[in-house]
Amino acid sequence: MAKNIQAIRGMHDVLPDQTPLWQFLERRVAGVLAAYGYREIRMPILEQTELFKRSIGEVTDIVEKEMYTFDDRNGDSLTLRPEGTAGCVRAAMENGLLHNQTQRLWYQGPMFRHERPQKGRYRQFHQIGVETFGMPGPDVDAELILITARIWRELGIDGLELQLNTLGSADERAAYRTELVDYLQAHHERLDADSRRRLGSNPLRILDSKNPAMRELLDGAPTMHAHLGDETRRHLDFVCDTLTRAGVAFVLNPRLVRGLDYYSRTVFEWVTDRLGAQGTVCAGGRYDGLVEQLGGKPVPAVGFAMGLERLVAVLEEIDPGAGAAVADVYLVLLGDAAVTEGLVLAERLRDALPGREVVAHCGGGGMKAQFKRADRSGARYALVIGDAEVEGGTVALKSLRADEEQILVARDAIVDVLLARLAV
Ligand code: HAM
């Protein structure tokens, strides 16, 4: 027999008993974003490879080794998006959304990175991302972080730590880079192979090294702080003051550098210790140079993205039942005539009971088997139609959760009886 085809490693099905939690998460986040005046944008999943190379940066893990890139039938190099910022900027530029206006946008969907799969790290994963354009000041940086804090409250997630840093302006970063390279150069023999390679191309990323052998060397490295100009300091101070006044706690982490090259000034990450090594559930920052880098007039921008698999994992620990839907009414239908009557009655019930879940049994089977399904659906009430009820124009109403007498109700009266019962 041929071997069954399986899903691609690191790419997962979200099964029906998991989707309620996903929907709960997606609905709550969309609700918060709407409350702040953010509007949804939907971009293609495939983009030209060049877009990611030019925005995320040639010397990043993502572009160097994680992208799903292929030539299409015309020989064009395309890439499954590893993140949403690049495509959102491309879409906003291409559709004239950046001319003399501000934008507050959000998107959601699958992203693809060929990383080594482990708990919390997948090759297809999902993000909800937010991007804003045209606002140069720290006000919107603070707003974005307040949004994330509200999202955690709405989801009932506590215990996340907010880490904050500034990467300065391009000039400030360049000056810091020189000092950092000098320091690392002087300790060249203590650098691992990866860091030696990065020294010439992307030395700031060395700070993010996970290699414990490098820890001491990096702890002694100069920080960005001395190179920050007044403007950058004011920007950071404003964000910190606003967060403090709004009651959002944060930790300043001078080693927070992010894995994508487009950032400047504010960067932040929300981290949990509930998920082991992959603890960052949300991350983002300012990227004032990106639009120009992609060929547009300079437009300031800032955004973030949250990883839905990681948030679902946190929610599963806290409240696995969140968002779970259960049926309200299950129709047990015994015999062909009853099935027809039942399907018609179910239509009437759905008209009369908006928002309620009404499930009509399909697929035949005896009374016992159907009641088993009714019970598993979680429904509070079963409506039973058999030959006698067809004949008498009635339906039997049985509570599946409470110790109530089964009663026989005229078919015309059942909507009112159910409305009254379900209301309590
Ligand atoms: P990122 O830090 O690469 O940033 O990803 C954001 C979040 O996506 C991470 O914090 C994590 O929760 C989730 N994530 C990333 N990779 C994986 C993976 N392999 N498996 C599961 N979850 C993952 C960005 O993508 C930027 N575009 C964020 C941004 C928006 N910055 C400005 N605007």
Image: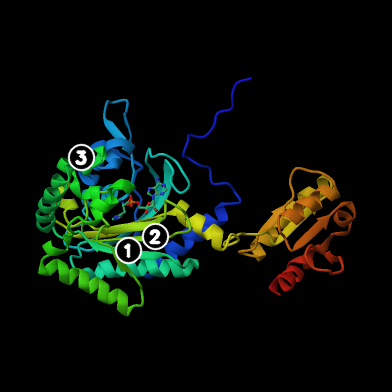
* Rendered position, 128 above or below 10: below
Q: CA distance from mark 1 to mark 3?
A: 27 Å
Which of the numbered marks, if any, corresponds to residue 97?
none
Q: CA distance from mark 2 to mark 1?
A: 8 Å
In the displayed structure, does residue 304 sit left or right of residue 8? left
For residue 131, say whether it is visible.
no
Amino acid type, mark 1: Gln
Depth check, front residue: 291 or 237: 237
Q: Residues within 10 Å of mark 1 (few under 14, many from 20)?
A: some
Per the image, label 2 sits on a secondary structure element best described as strand
In the displayed structure, does residue 1 sit left or right of residue 44? right
Q: Position of residue 121 (x, y in %)?
A: 43, 46
Which of the numbered marks, if any, corresponds to residue 163?
1
Task: Name the residue at 64% across, 19% down.
Answer: 1
Per the image, label 1 sits on a secondary structure element best described as strand
Q: How is the image coloured?
A: rainbow
Disc 2 vs disc 1: Cβ atoms closer than 8 Å? yes
Depth check, front residue: 72 or 207: 207
Q: Residues within 10 Å of mark 3 (few under 14, many from 20)?
A: some
Q: Is mark 3 within 8 Å of ligand 1?
A: no
* Rendered position, 223 above or below 150: above
Amino acid type, mark 3: Arg
Task: Name the residue at 76% across, 63% down.
Answer: 381
Disc 1 vs disc 3: Cβ atoms closer than 8 Å? no
The quadrant of the rendering that contains the C terminus is: bottom right
Snapshot quadrant of residue 365: top right
Q: Position of residue 251 (x, y in %)?
A: 32, 67
Q: Which residue is mark 2?
A: 271
Q: Which residue is mark 3?
A: 196
The total number of labels drawn is 3
